[in-house]
Image (cartoon, rainbow, N blue to C red):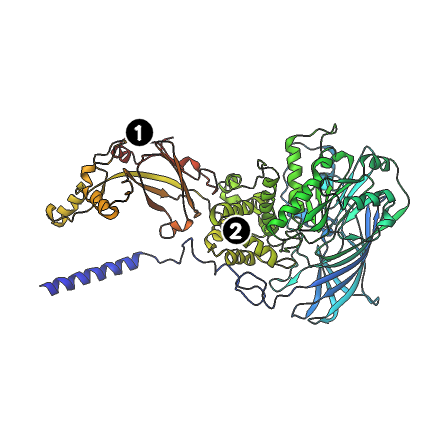
Amino acid sequence: MKKISFAFLVLLCTASQLILAQTQKGHTNTNKFKQLKDEFATPNSQHSASGAPGTHYTQQQVDYDMDIVLDDTRQRLSGFEKITYHNNSEDTLEYLWLQLDQNKLAKDSKSPDIEIDTVDPLYTPATFAKKFIEAPFDGGFNIEAVQQSNGNELSYTINRTMMRIDLPKPLASGKTFKFEIKWWYNIIDHTIDRTRSGYEHFEEDGNKLYVIAQFFPRLAVYDNVEGWQNMQFWGRSEFALEFGDYKVKITTPKDHVLNATGVLTNPKEVLTKTQLKRLNASKNSFDKPVMIVTQEEAEVAEKSTSKETKTWHFNAKNVRDYAFASSRKFIWDAMAVDINGTAVMAYSLYPKEGNPLWEKYSTRVVAHTLKEYSKYTFDYPYHKAISVHSKNQGMEYPQICWNYGRPRKDGTYSDRTRDAMIGVITHEIGHNFFPMIVNSDERQWTWMDEGLNSFIETLTELAFDKDFNTGNLPKDIVPYMGGDQSNIAPIMTQGDQVYQFGPNAYTKPAAGLYLLRETILGQKLFDYAFRTYSRRWMFKHPTPEDFFRTMEDASGADLDWFWRGWFYTTDVCDIAVKEVNQFRVTDKPTKRILSMAKELGVPAERIRPGLFLTTDEISEGEPEKIEDIQLLTSYLEKKYKNKIAPEIPSYVYEIVFEKPGGLVMPIIAEITYEDGRKKRKTYPAQIWQKNDREVRKIISSTKAIKSILIDPDLETADVDTTNNSWPTLKKSVFDLKKEGFKTQQ
């Protein structure tokens, strides 16, 4: 009979399993802590599993020798460049790709065609004429010659913002190729078209201030990840460039003041004796800026226009790009910055329209930024950093950048204007580190330069002023992350495909790294890992995987769950206190135990002596009943004998945390007791490994808990804080249970 029953039971179980197998669908590993092996590129000899450059890592070098002429009368830039291309890869190349960024402004450019047009309710005459009447500005490259050094013409093809040069014969690994390009283009008024390069016209004195960049045909990157990086330049996603050495001569009107990437090699020919004397004095001024060109001198210069010219000579070593700024309106001040025993020059160039704001802050902010960034990454390796005043502009290049922040015409300015200027200078000077030195692919991954830079910018601004509103903290990204999901893309999205560029490429990566540093890893582990990444990839081309892997490799932490959630998805953080159950300790069998024993047919007297947690007959503030815990008191007396035994907890709480949001994050719980004392407890994100919906934690105390608050300092970008708190118990546990432990607001 027993055998028949057992066989029947087995048959019943088998049938049940078959039914379940037919009705339930399987699934892949969807755990939020799953490793990122499917998303990451496979490590290889160029980009190693540790995140460091591999033993076979290579990158190209491109050297430029350029003669540039700035025509201030016709607003035209012309140039002749000699290029030496070093094929350091293991591949043989049949052609070279160059970037022609100015072709975005060509009259036949397709960039305007991909923008969505809407009718504005109000137009100024200028904007209406530009949009509906006037012909498009023609600012594209006019290529006059492409030839070898011996004068033989080279075959080339222009595809919008890219140009392919067909080599006379394949360029083998380890070989170089030299060629020349002659070109010119019309310079645009960047204050109208909001371009990165161009001029601003000053109506009152008739002068122009030039900030010139992306001004020459430049080699695209060829690497062992993408091959040629020849994606079109549509205007947003920036530049992927090779390092090289530059020799540049720039001819300007004689009364212009100019500065640029590189070392000025003929200062005596282009500076007055007074300017040169002041410049030399500034090299020993570490506490305050020295005026090289004063406002009074600049105001005199802007009242007349010189017909003569002069040529500025610069040499730059190991830079990935080149830019310059020129105007007769420039005031120039300078000071030295001590970077671990090396003097680096901080410069500012600005017209009188920038004062008194710029004279007071700009160069000092440059100096502060160089010091702070060097602390978190590596010692700034170049000899100078320049901040140039440019209306409505914030843009970066090696050793030089454009920054906005203009006072009112009477010289007054708001705190908001001041802080915006300090913020943009910090940010753009910081770009000297990312991506001008840690040379990520901006065309592909905008966040790798903007996001990382915005993160260090945040630390730098808070060091400048602890109350500075950086806009890059986790709490600042909540409106974006909690917004319309149809208008949000993961951080790991190519820049031209991002919906909301600022929050996606700047704020969310910066806020995430701040969260990783302050809440998840801790400052010491994070700073060591971030510094390791920065130093590993100085003057090299890192990928996102190189960053992620290095941060884990150097910190000793598995962070795949964090990269996956924060960078690869648009999930949000939302952690709540679902319910709280209060218990007391007793050594008498509880109603629950007695009921279970009865169901199992076990007599009450056979229940093993022990300690039980119960909610039976608990009222607010009720202490433990000593007569109910003799087993525990006897145990403690025997264990500690003549020593002071620990206090027996009067209260035991079961806290149920739930996670309506998709992101896994640490649970930061601030517990306030009845006497006002607070205790902070942080549970690592790994608490969600086995249950992605809810988890339970037990807390015991000699004092009653008054309230529980999750994420009290807004560290985790929790998008809904209305469910983060549990109020003071005002009713019995039983009453609260009936109400489902609803949070009282």
**Mark 2 = which residue?**
526
Mark 1 neighbour density, 10 Å: few (under 14) some (14–19) many (20 or more): few
Describe the element under mark 1 as helix, strand or loop: loop
Pointer 2 or 1: first along the chain: 2
Q: Which residue ends up furthest to the front in the rendered image?
A: 642
In the rendered image, residue 24, in percent from the top left (x then y), is placed at: 32, 56
Q: Residue furthest right?
A: 307
Q: Residue at x 22, y 47 (%)?
A: 638
Q: Which quadrant of the structure image shows residue 145?
A: bottom right
Quadrant of the snapshot with the N terminus: bottom left
Residue 276, percent from left and from top = 84, 45
Q: Nearer the viewer, residue 380 or 249?
A: 380
Q: Is residue 230 above or below residue 679?
A: below
Using the rendered image of the protein, determine whether residue 496 is visible from the camera's viewpoint.
Answer: no
- The answer to whether any part of residue 61 appears in the image is yes
* On screen, residue 663 above or below 703: below
**Residue at point 60%, 41% (across, down):** 463
Residue bearing the label numbered 1: 730
Quadrant (top left, top right, bottom left, bottom right) of the C terminus: top left
Up the image or down, 745 lies above or below 149; here it is above
What amino acid is labelled 2 in the image? Phe
Say left or right for 448 vs 633.
right
Q: Nearer the viewer, residue 500 or 126?
A: 500
Quarter location, residue 48: bottom right
In front here: 665 or 446? 665
Cα–Cα span, label 2 and label 1: 43 Å
